[in-house]
Image: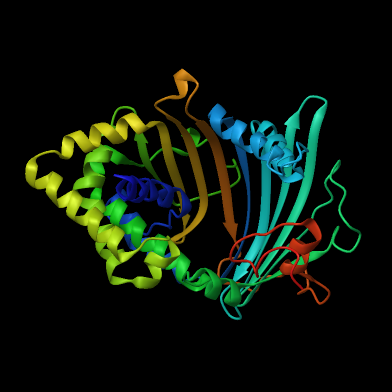
């Protein structure tokens, strides 16, 4: 069931990643389906938003695993990477991430700046992480992190990642294919769910993240909660999952991007068909309900002139073992406003000319990350 679980969980993640705008279609579901293509046609836009992590808890085994890795150097010392990872876990609950940036299609370029506030009380950490993306390159600015000394040659500098080289090393699809993957998977999800059960048109007063001065023509909400979660899993397994498997089987680049082999997909397809044939689909639904508890998964879109201009996401999920201190919990809220659609946009940063290659950064920090130019220590 591993590949099957990954595929169904992916559908839920996809629903968080993209809720395209709505047109004047006669129903909320049709509005979403029709306008997904409309938002994809936009040539440029700016955006700003806020993500707040309301609840975050990892299973003790995961935290201990990170800490245990600290002594994996054989000398009983502390691995700095593991120590930082453990510290970041503790900071995540209550984290607030403000984002802003711009996107344009021609020439292809996107900019994202994350202003991150971690921790609470007397223990706080504030970071600003700008990112620039073009068709061939990605640049990420290394933030100044208190308590983590970085060489002067990289602190505050942009690190350059050659995306074409990375794609070749990892054997994955390119950046250009990624939005299309999400769109097709989301269409499979949205099309599988009953409109009356999962879609609504809330009033503006009921959308807590919508600014009072932000005017929208239409609001549409897609919602999975404790009252309809069984219907959601059933629809996903009966209708959406077969479509997703076929999409991935027909598109090798998609499958590679998701690290799935043809054998994995064919096995999942056969397993699903066998369960449907033998009347065991309900058992699979019950298993998914036991694995993941969805208390709330709401995605609200605000539409102006047939384009998405507001998106709000509320998530509250946990694994079934959380009560026994063996699982994980995650709760967050995300608001995003879009503007300047199809207009000339201004970027905050120039393309870096003195960036540090990511391979050099790996060598300086003693990291050997797979698929990123080889092991540490190489010239």
Q: Position of residue 169 (x, y in %)?
A: 55, 72
Q: Is residue 163 above or below residue 208?
A: below
Q: Nearer the viewer, residue 119 or 172?
A: 172
Percent x, y for residue 7? Answer: 34, 51
**Residue at image coords 75%, 36%:** 76
Image vertical order of residue 316 relative to residue 195, above or below? above
Q: How many marks?
A: 0
Residue 24 in view: no
Quick check: can you spot residue 14?
yes
Residue depicted at x 45% and y 55%: 18
Asked if 297 appears above or below 268 in the picture, the reply is above
Where's residue 134, x and y in %?
Answer: 63, 74
Q: Residue at x 51, y 44 (%)?
A: 312
Is 206 left, or right, of 356 in this rendering?
left
Quadrant location of the C terminus in the rendered image: bottom right
| Front one among 319 and 113 | 319
Q: Is 70 left or right of 229, judged from the image as shown? A: right
Q: Quadrant of residue 1?
A: top left
Which residue is the extreme one toward the top?
324
């Amino acid at each position: 069931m591993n590949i099957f679980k990954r595929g169904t969980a992916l559908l839920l993640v996809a629903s968080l990643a993209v809720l395209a705008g709505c047109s004047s279609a006669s129903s909320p579901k049709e509005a979403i389906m029709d306008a997904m293509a409309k938002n994809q046609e936009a040539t440029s836009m700016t955006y700003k938003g806020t993500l707040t992590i309301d609840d975050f808890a990892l299973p003790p085994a995961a935290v201990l695993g990170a800490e245990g890795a600290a002594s994996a150097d054989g000398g009983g010392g502390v691995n700095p990477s593991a120590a930082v990872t453990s510290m970041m876990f503790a900071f995540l609950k209550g984290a607030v991430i403000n984002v802003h940036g711009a996107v344009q299609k021609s020439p292809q370029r996107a900019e994202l700046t994350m202003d991150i506030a971690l921790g609470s009380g007397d223990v706080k950490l504030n970071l600003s992480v700008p990112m620039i993306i073009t068709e061939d390159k990605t640049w990420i600015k290394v933030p100044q992190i208190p308590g983590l000394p970085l060489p002067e040659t990289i602190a505050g500098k942009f690190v350059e990642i050659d995306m074409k080289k990375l794609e070749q090393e990892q054997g994955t699809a390119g950046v250009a294919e990624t939005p299309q993957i999400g769109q097709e998977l989301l269409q499979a999800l949205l099309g599988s769910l009953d409109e009356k059960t999962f879609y609504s048109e809330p009033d503006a007063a009921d959308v807590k993240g919508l600014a009072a001065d932000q005017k929208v023509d239409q609001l549409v909400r897609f919602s999975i909660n404790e009252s309809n979660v069984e219907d959601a899993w059933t629809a996903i397994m009966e209708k959406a999952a077969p479509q997703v498997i076929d999409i991935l089987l027909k598109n090798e680049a998609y499958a590679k991007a998701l690290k799935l082999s043809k054998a994995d997909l064919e096995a999942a397809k056969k397993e699903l068909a066998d369960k449907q044939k033998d009347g065991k689909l309900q058992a699979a639904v019950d298993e998914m309900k036991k694995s993941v508890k969805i208390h709330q998964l709401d995605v609200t879109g605000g539409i102006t002139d047939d384009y998405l201009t507001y998106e709000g996401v509320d998530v509250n999920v946990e694994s079934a073992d959380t009560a026994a201190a063996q699982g994980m919990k995650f709760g967050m809220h995300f608001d995003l406003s879009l503007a300047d659609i199809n207009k000339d946009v201004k970027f905050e940063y120039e393309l870096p000319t003195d960036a540090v290659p990511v391979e050099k950064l790996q060598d300086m920090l003693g990291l050997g990350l797979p698929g990123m130019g080889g092991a540490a220590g190489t010239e």
